[in-house]
Image (cartoon, rainbow, N blue to C red):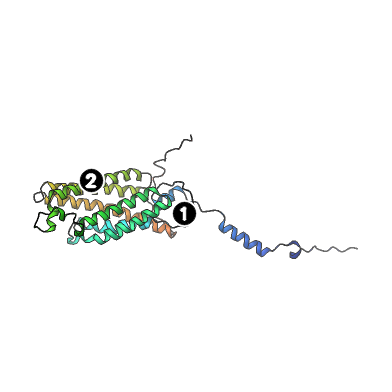
Amino acid sequence: MPTLTSPKISVQETGYDYQDDHDHRLHHSKTNGAVSISAELFEKLYLAPKTEVSGELRRTFGNPTPIGLVGFLIALTPLACDLMQWRGAGGSGATGIPQFFFFGGLLQFTAGLLEWVLGNTFPAAIFCTYAAFFLSFGSTLNPSFAAFSSFAPAGEDASTGLTTQAFNAGFGFFLVFMGLLSLIFLVCAFRTNVCFVIVFMALVFTFAFLTVAYWLLAEDYQGNAATANHFVIIGGGCAFVCCAAGWWILFALVLESVEFPFQLPVGDLSRLVKPRVHVPV
């Protein structure tokens, strides 16, 4: 009677190596495709609506948005406290000149360039704009640039230029158009999140109140000094509201970057304000 024998499968005969195949599948599962993030998460991370760009730079490099926010906040928050004259601060912001140059200027401008490289037009424009503002503001307060000493009467101290009509009226125009630019950013921010809207809304009021203060000083420096000081304090309060929203956004971004177990809401508006529909030609 014939005996039944079980067929043997030889690894050598079939050429199949389980270990090699397992390693190949494991490696393939780790590298297959790219991780895609939602439009809501993109807008939270980059503070801009998600747009299609060529290349893989967004997956190659890190997110520069927190860097720009750090520069903005470390420059503006102490200035806001200074304008509100907390703890006996002077109210002019002159103590913050180094922060304006390095945090507000250098750090923000670097972040703006990196955002531009990644194809994030909106945050690139924002960071570069306010970097230029802080560089200009710091330069105005720095005597080396002679921004106010040029208006000082001959033979008098350079600081008397700060009290002249020409200087205060001229600087007021700078603040007016910074407010206008912030208003444009405010409208665009309605495509991002609530916190970003608060940032620009507060900035619009900040520049508005500071403009009023400088123009009051231009009309009558001595007579309007007390009233102008009140407007400076109110402007500082608006700047502080802007900073509070900015710190919240920064905290949310940093938590997201390390995949923290809980996340902070920023009030997504991407579903409220729909993007323009592109009609194929």
Q: Is 259 placed left or right of 195 in the picture?
A: right
In the image, residue 7 sits, relative to residue 236, either above or below, namely below
Q: Choose between 135 and 260: the one closer to the eye.
A: 135
Q: Give the label on residue 134, or none.
A: none
Say what secondary structure mark 1 lies in.
helix
Q: Is 56 placed left or right of 66 in the picture?
A: right
The mark tally for this picture is 2
Q: Give the label on residue 57, or none.
A: 1
Does the image show residue 93? no
Q: Give the label on residue 176, or none.
A: 2
Quarter where residue 6 is shown: bottom right
Does the image show residue 109? yes
In terms of sequence position, does the residue under pointer 1 or pointer 2 come before the other? Answer: 1
Circle 1 packing at 10 Å, graded few (<14), some (14-19), many (20+), is few
Residue at position x 13%, y 58% from top?
158
Q: Is 234 placed left or right of 251 in the picture?
A: left
